Image (cartoon, rainbow, N blue to C red):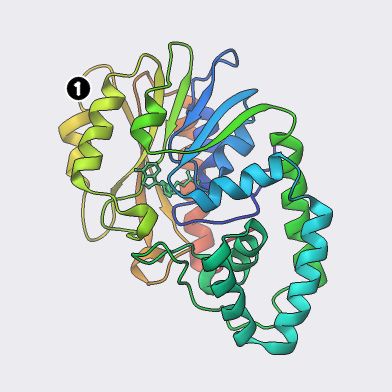
């Protein structure tokens, strides 16, 4: 089945890893799918559980999805908004992008958030120390072409169709509070920031956070799948060996090429790891090998850095 792409992007978005995550998640549909670091929500959007708790500390992400769910942001509202704002961007150029950015940083409207997410440089989502969105313009005043607007509207519609017909709860919460909700029979998918990699207001991830997360995962009353990094050409994640080599946990690794990022380093290949407190299915490992081969061949032809979707 084709992977559905969400309307907003964030660093570390798992769009390309969705098939592996879906194959690897041992989720029973009776329980609640819990994501303490939901980000763009691409994983839940594709797993499509009946019941979900989707949480993140980033209040703008949560407000955006709540607005889609409660119908304050609809596909037709998005179309009208982007046509109008896109036309202003075409006329006024860069200055208009910064006007919307200031407006968003004062009022935090979900539609402005969508506009910035789709018109900012490299499609990154970054907030400064005061929690203000600070990504510069992508330098494309005609960004919101009719085809691009239709693509975004379709992504909003697909998300609304899924989120409005299911028991999904979007919450602004620290992972500690979210994990406290897990019960036997639930499934927890965990995708924390990678320490020292994407540091901003909502991603200030420390070794202390990492240690609390590891201890909490080990005490969960249900199954979990953790996405983390195993290494790149510069460094290796020592914590995998240290914390997850014991019996009862399984580890799968595969190479992934990140297309979203402000620097060359962030766009490089990363060896990703999936860690679970149950045996990871062989199907997931076969798929990982297939994706690894496909990504290698794509890299040979990739000259631009735009995120797919
Ligand atoms: C790697 S991203 C998740 C990406 C997501 N799986 C996707 O595919 O789009 C990590 C997310 O964790 C959130 N975050 C950072 N610190 C957090 C914390 N202490 N508690 C909950 N969420 C946190 C960030 O706002 C960010 O959205």
- Where disc 1 sits, the SS reads loop
Locate the N terminus by quadrant.
Answer: top right
Label 1 near ligand 1 (CB < 8 Å):
no
Residue at x-position 29% and y-position 56%: 232
Residue at x-position 51% and y-position 59%: 297
Task: Give the x, y percent position of residue 204.
Answer: 30, 54
Q: Which of 275 and 91 lies nearest the eye of the viewer?
A: 91
* Total numbered labels: 1
Q: Which of 53 and 283 lies nearest the eye of the viewer?
A: 53
Q: Quadrant of residue 51?
A: top right
Residue 305 seen in the figure: no
Q: Which of 23 and 4 lies nearest the eye of the viewer?
A: 4
Q: Which residue is mark 1?
A: 246
Q: Residues within 10 Å of mark 1 (few under 14, many from 20)?
A: few
Task: Give the x, y percent position of residue 195.
Answer: 27, 51
Q: Is residue 280 above or below residue 301?
A: above
């Amino acid at each position: 089945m084709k992977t559905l792409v969400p309307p907003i992007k964030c660093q570390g978005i798992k769009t390309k890893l969705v098939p592996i995550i879906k194959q690897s998640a041992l989720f029973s549909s009776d329980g609640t799918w819990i994501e303490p670091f939901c980000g763009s929500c691409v994983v839940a959007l594709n797993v499509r559980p009946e019941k979900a708790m989707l949480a993140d500390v980033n209040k703008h992400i949560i407000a955006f999805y709540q607005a889609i769910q409660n119908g304050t942001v609809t596909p037709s509202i998005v179309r009208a908004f982007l046509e109008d704002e896109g036309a202003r961007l075409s006329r006024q150029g860069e200055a208009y992008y910064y006007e919307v950015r200031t407006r968003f940083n004062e009022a935090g409207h979900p539609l402005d958030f969508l506009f910035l997410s789709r018109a900012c440089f490299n499609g990154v989502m970054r907030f400064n120390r005061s929690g203000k969105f600070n990504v510069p313009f992508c330098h494309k005043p005609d960004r919101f072409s009719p085809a691009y607007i239709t693509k975004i509207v379709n992504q909003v519609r697909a998300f609304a169709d899924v989120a409005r017909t299911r028991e999904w709860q979007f919450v602004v919460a620290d992972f500690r509070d979210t994990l406290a909700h897990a019960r036997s029979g639930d499934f927890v998918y965990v995708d924390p920031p990678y320490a020292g990699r994407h540091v901003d207001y909502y991603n200030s991830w420390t070794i202390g956070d990492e240690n609390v997360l590891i201890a909490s995962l080990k005490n969960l009353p249900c199954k979990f799948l953790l996405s983390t990094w195993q290494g790149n050409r510069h460094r290796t994640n020592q914590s995998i060996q240290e914390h997850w080599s014991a019996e009862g946990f399984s580890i799968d690794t595969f190479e992934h090429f990140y297309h979203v990022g402000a620097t060359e380093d962030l766009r490089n290949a990363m060896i990703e790891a999936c860690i679970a407190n149950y045996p990871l299915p062989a199907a997931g490992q076969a798929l990982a090998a297939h994706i690894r081969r496909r990504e290698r061949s794509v890299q040979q032809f990739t000259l631009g850095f735009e995120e797919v979707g």
